[in-house]
Image (cartoon, grey):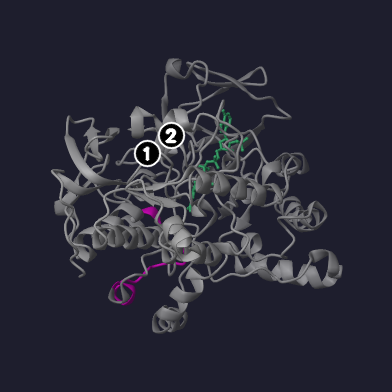
């Protein structure tokens, strides 16, 4: 414990953390137990878990391998926890996070059932005031938004939704008691990663399932199952190695691109590699494919063709198979869903696919079901799997007002602008964990979360040691970062998809690539952030003074 000098202010808290998912829990633990700060955490839910508290839809499980979808900062925790499967189910991850909350004694400092509605900076006192929907009002030196990247539900304004006589549910606001689909006619809207998990499960229980697809998805088998105990033993014995490898990897997995262009391979050679990745399951097909996949349309087409052939080979009805084959965007430019019997589900007699481009789009929700392409599909339950207002939505909901009363929502009207995805000009002492323009959703989240939490902890520790009151990104650093993030994305195929990465799923949202695809991968981004800190927090000003420029100009003198 470093126990730096506490902030000399009249604030109620040194830090307010918002959100008790993976990021907020570790942030609370770090600030309170490593820096000895006075911290409170507001959480809208009635328990810890974030994503894993809210997303309880059938089939919900993690798409990252369990041995790396966890905290790695505590060696003992890594040894004591045992995952039951390759990809843990939602309730198992929630049990894990509950265990962590108990283990690190976090709950006494978490205020559950309180949603932050206003977060205001006071230019005079340089403190933040945080207000909740339950009437709380506290002041704090620092605010850390640990609100997740995919936590603001997107419920499209379907005409007639209110008139529906049955029940409807958004997958991320699922009832804790579950939903019984027995003998019901169910409609699922959406075919993203969530729906791909839910559809096979619902089809097993429901009398009839109608899937309303707007854009088909390339899916790769998850290949879930028990992990060989010998593999688990070897991983546990080498967790420090695993930790180093994922920290310095491209996407936070033990995966690396094939260092070759697919265009330089023979059909036989690449087919063998594709088969290997397909058989491995998980993200290797997406994140460890030939290195030009995200850059060359010609290369991408070859890789996509393999997946299209798989769909044709799996789906019995060739007309349905064609509807399920993506044709309008390059492979990998939308988040890769992992599936367990997804395409096979469309061979079932009780499952019908309604495709927007061939059968007609959803026109309205009627009292009895959904009307699409001029036809009404009668339903008892509608499952809305339409995703999230990704990355910016959760931050905009915090009612953040910075210097001079400037609202974050206005500053970001034409798209988010951040420095490193951690900080925003005009919003001193406000940090975002896995914010827009950081690798965040392009990585195995716990790896990015740990990196941000540790960087923020170091930064606040540094401020305390140097008796500094405020930190804030400079306009120049932010501008350069925003340009850099856009340039990198522009050199890839990513902007060619109408994905949530591009903000394209939300009507009216500016079209802008939201996460940061670091050319040197997650390890490169980590290094960049560390070097910035080593250089005295280059691109930031403390108490209105640019210390790095002062140091540089002194050195020049
Ligand atoms: P999503 O990927 O945004 O998919 C939403 C689906 O709803 C898409 O098929 C979309 O079609 C459709 N849709 C949206 N608005 C619509 C409208 N107005 N009318 C008709 N269809 C509409 O959301 P998601 O499936 O919830 O997944 C979001 C992200 O959460 C994932 O990409 C992933 O990062 C994360 N996730 C992770 C896991 C995991 O690790 N286990 C599981 C689930 C989700 P378009 O494609 O045309 O927009």
Q: Is residue 486 left or right of residue 204?
A: right
Ligand 1, image quadrant it occupies: top right
Q: Residue furthest front?
A: 557
Residue 306 in sight from this viewpoint: yes
- Labels 2 and 1 touching (C-beta < 8 A): yes
47 or 225: which is nearer to us?
47
Secondary structure of the residue carrying tag 2 is strand
Q: Is residue 97 left or right of residue 226?
A: left
190 or 315: which is nearer to us?
190
Residue 175, given in percent of the width and then of the height, sits at 33, 38
Quarter the N terminus occupies: bottom left
Residue picked out by circle 1: 174
Residue range highlighted in magenta: 77-90
Residue picked out by circle 2: 170
Residue at left 52%, top 58%?
443
Q: Is mark 2 within 8 Å of ligand 1?
A: no
Residue 193, given in percent of the width and then of the height, sits at 54, 47
Residue at left 38%, top 68%?
84
| Residue density around tag 2, few if under 14, some if 14–19, many if 20 or more, within 10 Å | many
471 or 44: which is nearer to us?
471
* Quarter of the rendering containing residue 461: bottom left
Please say whether residue 94 is one of the residues in the magenta stretch.
Answer: no
Q: Is mark 1 within 8 Å of ligand 1?
A: no
| Residue density around tag 1, few if under 14, some if 14–19, many if 20 or more, within 10 Å | some
387 or 202: which is nearer to us?
387
Q: Measure how far apart labels 2 and 1 are at the Cα level.
A: 6 Å
* Quarter of the rendering containing residue 249: bottom right
Q: Is residue 524 above or below residue 134?
A: below
Residue 281, given in percent of the width and then of the height, sits at 60, 64
């Amino acid at each position: 414990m470093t126990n730096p000098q506490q902030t000399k202010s009249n604030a109620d808290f040194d830090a307010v953390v918002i959100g008790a998912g993976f990021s907020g829990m570790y942030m609370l633990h770090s600030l309170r137990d490593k820096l000895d700060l006075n911290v409170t955490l507001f959480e809208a839910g009635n328990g810890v878990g974030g994503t894993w508290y809210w997303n309880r839809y059938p089939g919900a499980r993690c798409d990252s391998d369990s041995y790396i979808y966890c905290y790695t900062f505590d060696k003992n925790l890594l040894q004591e926890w045992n995952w039951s499967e390759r990809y843990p189910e939602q309730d198992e991850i929630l049990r894990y996070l509950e265990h962590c909350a108990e283990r690190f004694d976090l709950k006494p400092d978490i205020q559950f059932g309180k949603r932050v509605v206003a977060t205001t900076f006071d230019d005079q006192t340089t403190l933040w005031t945080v207000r909740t929907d339950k009437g709380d009002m506290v002041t704090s030196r620092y605010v850390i938004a640990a609100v997740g990247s995919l936590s603001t539900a997107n419920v499209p304004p379907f005409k007639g939704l209110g008139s529906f006589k049955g029940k409807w549910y958004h997958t991320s606001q699922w009832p804790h008691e579950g939903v019984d689909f027995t003998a019901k006619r169910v409609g699922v809207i959406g075919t993203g990663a969530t729906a791909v998990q839910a559809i096979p499960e619902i089809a097993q229980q429901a009398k009839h399932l109608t899937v309303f697809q707007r854009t088909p998805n390339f899916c790769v088998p998850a290949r879930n199952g028990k992990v060989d105990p010998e593999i688990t033993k070897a991983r546990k014995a080498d967790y420090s190695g695993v930790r180093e490898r994922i920290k310095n990897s491209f996407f936070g997995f033990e995966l690396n691109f094939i260092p070759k262009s697919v265009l330089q391979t023979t059909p036989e050679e690449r087919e063998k590699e594709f088969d290997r990745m397909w058989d491995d399951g998980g993200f290797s097909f997406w994140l460890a494919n030939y290195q030009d996949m995200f850059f060359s349309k010609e290369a991408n087409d070859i890789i996509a063709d393999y997946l299209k052939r798989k769909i044709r080979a799996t789906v019995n009805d060739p007309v349905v198979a064609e509807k399920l084959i993506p044709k309008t965007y390059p492979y990998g430019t939308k988040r890769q869903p992992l599936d367990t019997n997804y395409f096979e589900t469309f061979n079932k007699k009780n499952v019908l696919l309604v495709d927007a481009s061939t059968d007609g789009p959803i026109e309205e929700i009627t009292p009895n079901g959904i009307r699409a392409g001029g036809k009404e599909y009668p339903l008892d339950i509608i499952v809305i799997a339409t995703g999230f207002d990704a990355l910016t939505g959760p931050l905009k909901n915090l009612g953040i007002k910075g210097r001079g009363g400037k609202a974050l929502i206005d500053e970001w009207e034409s798209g988010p602008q951040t420095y490193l995805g951690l900080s925003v000009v005009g919003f001193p002492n406000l940090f975002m964990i896995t914010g827009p323009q950081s690798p965040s959703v392009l990585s195995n989240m716990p790896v990015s979360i740990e990196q941000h939490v540790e960087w923020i902890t170091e930064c606040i520790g540094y401020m305390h040691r140097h008796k500094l009151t405020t930190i804030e990104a400079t306009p120049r650093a932010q501008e350069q970062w925003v340009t850099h993030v856009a340039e990198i994305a522009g050199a890839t195929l990513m902007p060619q998809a109408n994905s949530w990465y591009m903000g394209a799923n939300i009507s009216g949202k500016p079209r802008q690539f939201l996460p940061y695809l670091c050319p040197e991968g997650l390890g490169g981004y980590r290094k960049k952030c560390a070097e910035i800190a080593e250089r005295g927090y280059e691109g930031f000003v403390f108490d209105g003074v640019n210390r790095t420029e002062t140091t540089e100009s002194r050195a020049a003198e």
